[in-house]
Image: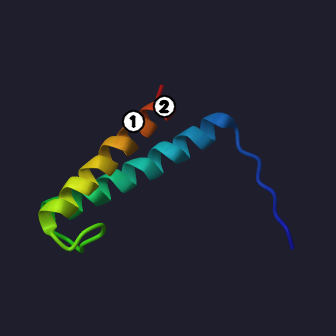
Amino acid sequence: MSINIELEPEQVDVIMVQELTRQIEDFEENITNGGLAIFDDDQAKDAVHMQEYISALTLVRSWYSV
């Protein structure tokens, strides 16, 4: 069984912005609340890595938000 769904480019943009925003918020919450280690066991180093990802995801999100 196969289902094909066609989306308009604007719809894809909205989905991408929503997902990137969700990921950014997840990383920010993890930094704020000292959640699970993702990149490094050292919490400070882990926060630095997450902040780098937040910056990158924010840049990518801006490409879809133009």
* Whether label 1 touches label 2, CB < 8 Å: yes
The quarter of the displayed image where residue 36 is located: bottom left
Residue lying farthest to the top in this orientation? 66
Between 35 and 5, the residue placed more toward the observer is: 35
Q: Position of residue 28 (x, y in %)?
A: 23, 55
The residue closer to the viewer here, 10 or 46, is 46
Helix, strand or loop for disc 1: helix
* Residue occupying image coordinates x 47% and y 43%: 17
* 7 on left or right of 52: right
Q: How many marks?
A: 2
Q: Which quarter of the picture shows residue 25?
A: bottom left
Name the disc covering residue 10, or none: none
Q: Position of residue 57 (x, y in %)?
A: 39, 45
Q: Between residues 40 and 6, which one lies in front from this camera angle?
A: 40
Looking at the image, residue 12 sits to the left or right of residue 7; the answer is left
Q: Which residue is mark 1?
A: 59
Looking at the image, what colour scheme do you see? rainbow
Residue under the point 30% across and 66% down: 39
Amino acid under label 2? Trp
Query: Where is residue 21 drawn, in percent x and y?
Result: 38, 48
* Amino acid type of the residue tagged 1 in the rendering: Leu
What label sits on residue 63 in the rendered view? 2
Report the side of 8 relative to 51 (left or right): right
Residue that extends furthest to the right in the rendered view of this protein: 1
Q: Is residue 63 above or below residue 33?
A: above
Local packing at callout 2 (Cα closer than 10 Å; few below 14, some 14-19, many 20+) is few
Residue 12 placement (x, y as % from top left): 61, 43
At a point 71% along the width and 44% down the height, the residue shown is: 7
Helix, strand or loop under label 2 = helix
- Mark 1–mark 2 distance (CA, rounded to whole Å): 7 Å
What residue is at 18 percent from the left and 61 percent from the top?
45
Front position in the image: 5 or 38? 38
